[in-house]
Amino acid sequence: MALDAKAKETALRQFTTGLYVVGSKGHGDAINGMTANWVAQVSFHPPLVAVAVEQDAHTCRLIDEGRVFSVNVIRADEAAEDIVGKFVKPARRAGNKLEDEEFTTGETGAPLLARALSWVECRVVAQHQTGDHILYVGEVVGADVNREGEPLVLAQLGWHYGG
């Protein structure tokens, strides 16, 4: 039986996913942030998080260099679209996406957004090529909660991702 392309697209778009800003740090002062929705906790002990990044993304190069990343959970509020909107554009077109965004760095040096609901920072312990993405698995080495609220879900912005 052949794959029904329309059914596949509809089914994948119905997956409930969050929308996050993944921070990266390469060599020296090279940092970046990008939107991601393929993020999941994959282990309790040790605490591991997986994130999938397109192979040609600037963030992919920086994670390969620095072997660290952060996951910033965005709060579902009026600022959500502003926050994710600035990180959805490729760095080659947008330039420094962090220049007017308040952030700190923790143990790994990856950016931790001040406007995030919460964040984790991770050291890469494994990576796997998965089609047109690289799946990075990182051990959580730092975490914090900046404020109360509900996390942003992709569909709340009217966005859909699946193909």
Image (cartoon, rainbow, N blue to C red):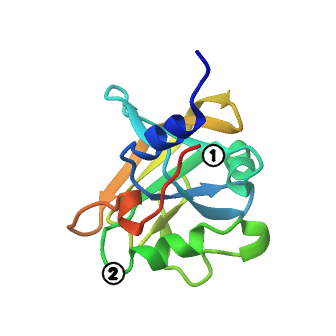
Residue 11 in percent (x, y) is at 44, 38
Q: Which residue is mark 2?
A: 78
- Mark 2 Cα shell of 10 Å, populated few (<14), some (14-19), many (≥20): few
Considering every residue shown, the one lying at the far bottom of the view is 100
Rendered-image quadrant of the N terminus: top right
| Three-letter code, disc 2 | Glu
Residue 23 in percent (x, y) is at 56, 58
| Direction from residue 88 to residue 79 in the image, left or right | left
Residue 12 in percent (x, y) is at 47, 40
Tell me if residue 62 comes above or below residue 12 in the rendering: below
The one nearer the camera, 157 or 66, is 157
Tell me if residue 133 comes above or below residue 43 in the rendering: below
| Direction from residue 148 to residue 154 in the image, left or right | right
- Mark 1 Cα shell of 10 Å, populated few (<14), some (14-19), many (≥20): many
Dot label at residue 107: none
Q: Secondary structure at mark 1?
A: strand
The one nearer the camera, 118 or 130, is 130
Q: Residue at x 67, y 39 (%)?
A: 133
Q: Which residue is mark 1?
A: 53
Q: Residue at x 77, y 73 (%)?
A: 93
Q: Secondary structure at mark 2?
A: loop
Q: Is residue 95 visible?
A: no
